Image: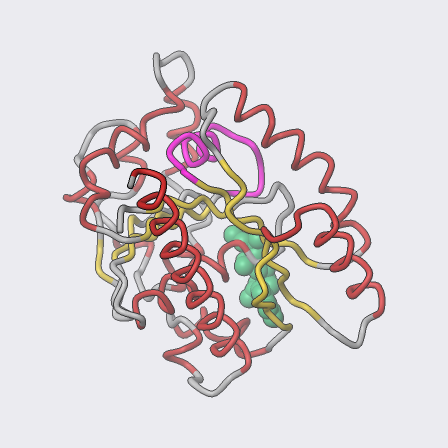
Amino acid sequence: MSTRVLAVANQKGGVGKTTTCVNLAASLAAMKRRVLLIDLDAQGNATTASGINKNELSATAYEVLTQRQPIDAVVKRSSAGYTVLPANGDLTAAEIELIGEIGREYRLKKALAEYKKQFDFVLIDCPPSLNMLTLNGLAAADGLIIPMQCEFFALEGLAALINTIEQIQETVNPNLKVEGVLRTMFDPRNSLARDVSRQLIQYFGNSVYRAIIPRNVRLAEAPSHGLPVLKYDRQSKGTIAYLALAGEMIRRAKDRSRAATAEVG
Ligand code: ADP
Ligand code: MG
């Protein structure tokens, strides 16, 4: 199976991008997949939630994007069995430094070209805006995972998001595909949530993951312990949901490679 590079993005903040990256990385690792998690958010939440102290790093994604250090010299190992390219506030400087540089959108893609081959999945946690860091993430990705909170404003943001995806396809990455739409913080008792969910399926069809992430307090608590939820509360609904998502992703990847083989043969 070749490497899948997936950017987890949505311009909206607080929809579960970081939570999805960390818990998906841990779940895929628990299923014996080799995973690299790239933190592209200067807040460094994915780094912290992976049990890595963002204030004690000698180098971060900043050094990689500004080509001061090779990626393999900067990555860390999370105790949950995956590799992390960490981030902290230093990343805000990258944004400014890259202005005026030729090929600035492709720095991450370049850094990953050879390095990614040792992983099955590369997950990129994008910040909640379309800045140069997000552009680097989207330029490097084969697919986009869009976490969506099923609330009224989700659909309002949807038009903007689709517009953005089209712009990316027309510019930095013609091959970018929507890998999947993930319903997060889902409350099945809420009729609006069910409505929005239905509309997502109407628009995105099979791209909507069957796995649904419920609202679960364990998912919100785990990061302050520097742990993915499966290491924090193995029985929680959050753990079960992210394991189901990982299983679904692995099945899709297998189907895809089978289809590709059939085409060639
Ligand atoms: P983003 O990266 O999109 O800004 P986060 O993953 O940081 O979003 O999530 C925003 C907040 O919501 C965090 O405090 C997180 O712990 C919490 N959260 C995320 N997903 C869930 C969930 N399924 N259930 C409960 N809380 C959640
Ligand atoms: Mg985040």
| Residue at the farthest right position | 191
Q: Quadrant of the C terminus?
A: top left
Q: Is 177 above or below relative to 55?
A: above
Q: Position of residue 197 (x, y in %)?
A: 74, 59
In the rendered view, does 151 fall on the left or right side of 220?
A: right
Q: Is 34 above or below relative to 203?
A: below
Q: Position of residue 125 (x, y in %)?
A: 44, 48
Q: Which residue is found at the position 70% from the left and 54% from the top?
A: 201
Membership of 128 in magenta stretch: yes
Report the span colored magenta. 127-142
Is residue 14 something that shows in the picture? no
Q: Which residue is found at the position 58% from the left and 37% from the top?
A: 129
User: Is residue 162 or residue 249 the one in the foreground?
Assistant: 249
Q: Quadrant of ligand 1?
A: bottom right
In the rendered view, does 115 fall on the left or right side of 134?
A: left
Q: Which residue is found at the position 26% from the left and 28% from the top?
A: 110
Q: Which residue is found at the position 35% from the left and 14% from the top?
A: 101
Is residue 262 something that shows in the picture? yes
Q: Is 194 above or below relative to 257?
A: below
Membership of 167 in magenta stretch: no
Query: Which of the 4 image quadrants contains residue 152?
Result: bottom right
Q: Is 192 above or below relative to 123?
A: below
In the rendered view, does 228 fall on the left or right side of 17?
A: left
In the rendered view, does 1 fall on the left or right side of 131?
A: left
Q: Position of residue 240 (x, y in %)?
A: 49, 78
Q: How is the image coloured?
A: secondary structure
Q: Position of residue 199 (x, y in %)?
A: 78, 53
